[in-house]
Amino acid sequence: MKKYIDSGKIDTRSGFGVGLYEAGKADPRVVALTADLKGSLKMDQFAAEFPDRFIQCGIAESNMVGVAAGLAVTGKIPFIGSFAEFVSGRVYDQVRQEVGYGHTNVKIASSHAGITLGEDGATHQTMEDIALMRAIPGMGVINPCDFNQTKQATIAAAKYDGPVYLRFGRPSWPNFTPDEPFEIGKAYIMNEGSDVTIIACGHLVWESIKAAEALEAEGISAEVINIATIKPLDEAAVLASALKTKAVVVAEEHNSAGGIGELVAGVLAKSAPTPMEFLNGEDKWGQSGTPAELLAAYGLDAAHIVLAAKKAIARK
Amino acid sequence: MATVNELQKIASQVRRDIVRMVTASKSGHPGGSLGSTDIMTVLFFNEMKQDPKTWTRDAKGQDAFILSAGHMAPVYYSVLARAGYFPKEELGTLRKFGSRLQGHPSVERGLPGIFLPSGSLGQGLAAAAGIALGKKLDKEDNNVYVLCGDGESEEGEIWESGMFAVHHKLDNLIAMTDVNGQQIDGPTSSVAAIAPLDQKWKAFGWNVIEADGNDIQAIMDAFAMAKANKGSGKPTMILFKTEMGHGVDFMAGTHKWHGKAPSPEQCAEAMKQLEETLGDF
């Protein structure tokens, strides 16, 4: 299978920070807002280079969303940054009315998403945000898989005309994708295979690659798809892969309700019903622990993906 | 510049529009709209630098207005139509299927004059602050106006925006609160301890002006004071004391007409009290 090399562990939020700075350098309309989390969102370089375009909002996320919508009305391209929960669930109604229904060109930078946030525990481990943001008409939803892809997705989001929810994480994580322009709406085929399709987003793309390597050692050929853009979904890529392998596993750091598992199942049910296995939060709350401990405990690591792949294949 | 008399005549027609629109749609919010009619009339016919012929949603080179209390859509639509943003005949489509005049302001169907949707309360002040900040970044001299309700001020986001606008020195932001003392469940004083609004806004660091919101001259004077504040680095909050349902005796001074449409008979009764000055739609 295709070989992936970790060029050095680094957090995806740092990819956002670099991408934001690059986007700001390329386009003076880009402005950045945060609710007292400049450092956590890695906005320091942007703030230092473009102080007039960096807007500190204090711990007041609702207001930050409205201010961003107003700035977008005047032609700015605002990125609002905070922890995933505070720019999704906490401000759902503001995002719905002022960004979604308001058709404003606001980019929501959502860090520390998912169970791999780790030690902070369930209050901060957002597992519902994809469902919330997917449900808003017209909202783009992107969850890149590593530093390079997060950087490039940030640059792409700045160029994209419309609201975007850009989801990434806190922990240091393998950086293994090429540093090349991100295409919104394209599913990235990380490995071509014939026996089973593993679909994942975010940190779990790396786990899926590790799982595919383990499966290969057992003579099972796994196709790995990094869904990256959750909305609009690359339905053609999902469909083509499912028709080829006839067995699908979906892994995500998100609750079962409204996540990418249900999304993919909806696509396949319409035109290619396929045996599927789902790895997700299973309607449970998270808890404190290291990312590795939590991924294992909640059944989201490579070992569990291997088991799920075998189960899906057995159901063909 | 319009005279007080001219503005009073426009306000009378706007009030006729409001009652007739809500009657025709058999739903909507006449009380707050009637109470804030004089403010909105002065704003759109004397105060704002905004030209319907060259209006664009980015507000470039023009003043901007946000209706934070989105349920007061009838008065908003009437002043927009009367000011020339769209044909007055369209007022009769309020809340009807396919209309650009949605129950609460919307940008979905491209109604000229609307910058952002409102209806879910407490969000307009933040949006207006964002437009005001955008104008500062663009070194534009125009002002941004926003109308909130006193009941709406129970929303926490209003006070988040209150801190933000002061911190970012948005002295091009002129906020107004329609203090009619009423909300859906009764007098505001019976619902929540929102008073004293003047002391609250002063404590937040705003330039606070209090005026009679049903007196055209007093409204004009309040706007003049607000604009004189420019350069101070402080945003302005004008607390306009109004009477809900003002201009129609049986609708005045009560929360009972917050979200209720008059019957055709009640509409006819109201029309006797409001002079037709510009021709009904």
Image (cartoon, coloured by chain):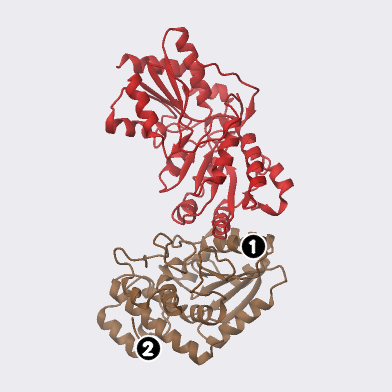
Query: Do tags 2 and 1 sit on the same chain?
Result: yes
How many numbered marks appear? 2
Give the residue at x 53% y 24%. Answer: A294
Side of B163 relative to A159 (left or right)? right
The 10 Å Cα crowd at callout 1, few under 14, some 14 to 19, many 20 or more, is: many
Shown in red, the chain is: A
Shown in brown, the chain is: B
Is any part of residue B196 visible from this angle?
no
Side of A35 relative to B91 (left or right)? right
Question: Label 1: which residue?
Answer: B165
Position of B47 relative to B167 (above/below): below
Task: Give the chain of mark 2.
Answer: B
Q: Which one is in front, A168 or A83?
A: A168
Residue type at the position of mark 1: Ala
Task: Give the chain of mark 1.
Answer: B
| Residue B119, image quadrant | bottom left
Q: Classify the position of the C terminus of chain B by image quarter.
A: bottom left
Q: Position of residue A122 (x, y in %)?
A: 53, 34
Question: Label 2: which residue?
Answer: B274
The 10 Å Cα crowd at callout 2, few under 14, some 14 to 19, many 20 or more, is: some
Q: Position of residue A247 (x, y in %)?
A: 34, 20
Give the residue at x 49% y 53%. Answer: A99
| Residue A145, image quadrant | top right
Q: Position of residue A154 (x, y in %)?
A: 58, 40
Is any part of residue B86 visible from this angle?
yes
Please, what secondary structure does the residue beneath circle 1 have? helix
Side of B234 relative to B122 (left or right)? right
**Distance between the alpha carbons at the discs numbered 2 and 1:** 39 Å
Position of B226 relative to A261 (above/below): below
Q: Which one is in front, A157 or B175?
A: A157
Give the residue at x 54% y 16%. Answer: A3
CB within 8 Å, label 2 to label 1: no
